[in-house]
């Protein structure tokens, strides 16, 4: 799987990424209402000290209702809180929302503010 993701990263021609860090985590939202508040993702490090800069989300289940990954506008103060995964307080506009669909792969920079909307249809697995 890592080699396929590396090929995808190379084809995207991202200026600050050329390979993947092979540290996979799985998330499951087994109950309705499961969500995550606004945040940014933290980097991961491999055994050689390589630092990740992007997050891959691979949806492993469909949610026809709820559970969207919602991208939010950045606010002044976000950069100062990013090292801890936080974002500045205050209202934010929604930039985009991605519905969980089995097999959908989402790639985003760690520093992109986002949230996980409350799950209605369970389980949500990614």
Image: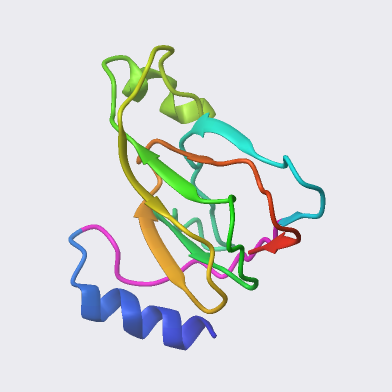
The colour mode here is rainbow
For the N terminus, give its image quadrant: bottom right
- The image quarter containing residue 80 is top left
What kind of secondary structure does the magenta stretch mostly adopt?
Answer: loop
Q: Is residue 67 left or right of residue 40?
A: right
User: Residue 2: percent from the left, percent from the top?
Assistant: 51, 81
Foreground: 95 or 50? 95
Residue drawn at x 44%, y 23% is: 87
User: Residue 105: percent from the left, percent from the top?
Assistant: 45, 71
Q: Is residue 7 left or right of residue 20?
A: left
Residue drawn at x 34%, y 85% is: 7
Residue drawn at x 35%, y 41% is: 112
Residue drawn at x 66%, y 48% is: 119
- The image quarter containing residue 61 is bottom right
Magenta stretch contains residue 88: no
In the picture as drawn, the residue positioned furthest to the right comes out as: 31
Q: Is residue 6 visible?
A: yes
User: Residue 67: percent from the left, percent from the top?
Assistant: 59, 51
Start-end of magenta stretch: 16-27
Q: Is residue 18 left or right of residue 23?
A: left
Magenta stretch contains residue 23: yes
For the C terminus, give its image quadrant: bottom right
Q: Is residue 53 visible?
A: no
Q: Is residue 100 above or below residue 87?
A: below
Foreground: 99 or 106? 99
User: Residue 69: percent from the left, percent from the top?
Assistant: 48, 49
Foreground: 105 or 42? 105
């Amino acid at each position: 799987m890592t080699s396929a993701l590396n090929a995808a990263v190379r084809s995207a021609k991202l200026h600050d990424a050329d390979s993947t860090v092979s540290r996979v985590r799985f998330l499951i939202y087994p109950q309705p209402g499961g969500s995550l508040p606004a945040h940014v993702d933290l980097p991961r490090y491999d055994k050689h000290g390589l630092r990740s800069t992007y997050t891959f989300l691979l949806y492993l289940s469909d949610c026809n209702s709820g559970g969207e990954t919602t991208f939010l506008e950045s606010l002044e103060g976000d950069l100062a809180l990013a090292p801890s995964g936080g974002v500045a307080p205050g209202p934010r506009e929604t930039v985009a929302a991605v519905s969980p669909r089995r097999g959908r792969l989402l790639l985003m920079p760690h520093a992109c503010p986002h949230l996980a909307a409350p799950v209605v249809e369970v389980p949500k697995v990614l």
